[in-house]
Image (cartoon, rainbow, N blue to C red):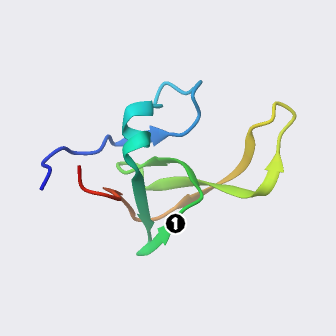
Amino acid sequence: MSTETLPDRLSTDPKSPFHDAALLERGIGIKFNGIDRNNVEEYCVSEGWVRLAVGKTVDRHGKAMTVKYKGTVEPYFRAPE
């Protein structure tokens, strides 16, 4: 069992200062308000919010459109290392 902890904030956007490609490659899961979500673009545990992708809609720069929801955020590693 790994004792490594996940960061307080993580983003899938490579241009974000909160992006960590190595962690994302390992497979991060997010439980938001007790429901396992697979469309999370960014999360922040301490502030209690996630940004969820809205369908396949993209903005003029080609990035996924997102909606910010507040609630309980629980990140975890999908597969043990």
Quadrant where the N terminus is found in the figure: bottom left
Which sits in the foreground, 79 or 16?
79
Residue 30: quarter of image: bottom left
- Crowd around label 1: few <14 · some 14–19 · many ≥20 (10 Å): few
User: How many numbered marks does the figure carry?
Assistant: 1
- Would you place residue 24 above or below residue 19 in this image? below
Q: Position of residue 64 (x, y in %)?
A: 73, 45
Query: Residue drawn 29% across and 45% down?
Result: 6
Query: Could you tell me the amino acid type at mark 1?
Result: Arg
Q: Is disc 1 placed on a helix, strand or loop?
A: strand
Q: Position of residue 72 (x, y in %)?
A: 40, 65
Can residue 1 be seen by looking at this rendering?
yes
Query: Residue drawn 34% across and 42% down?
Result: 8
Q: Position of residue 74 (x, y in %)?
A: 35, 61
Q: Position of residue 14 (x, y in %)?
A: 57, 28
Q: Residue furthest right?
A: 60
Which sits in the foreground, 47 or 29?
29
Query: Residue drawn 37% across and 38% down?
Result: 23
- Would you place residue 23 above or below residue 45 in this image? above
- Would you place residue 66 above or below residue 14 in this image? below
Residue 73: quarter of image: bottom left
Can residue 20 be seen by looking at this rendering?
no
The residue beneath circle 1 is: 37
- Indicate left or right for 36 with 58 as reference: left
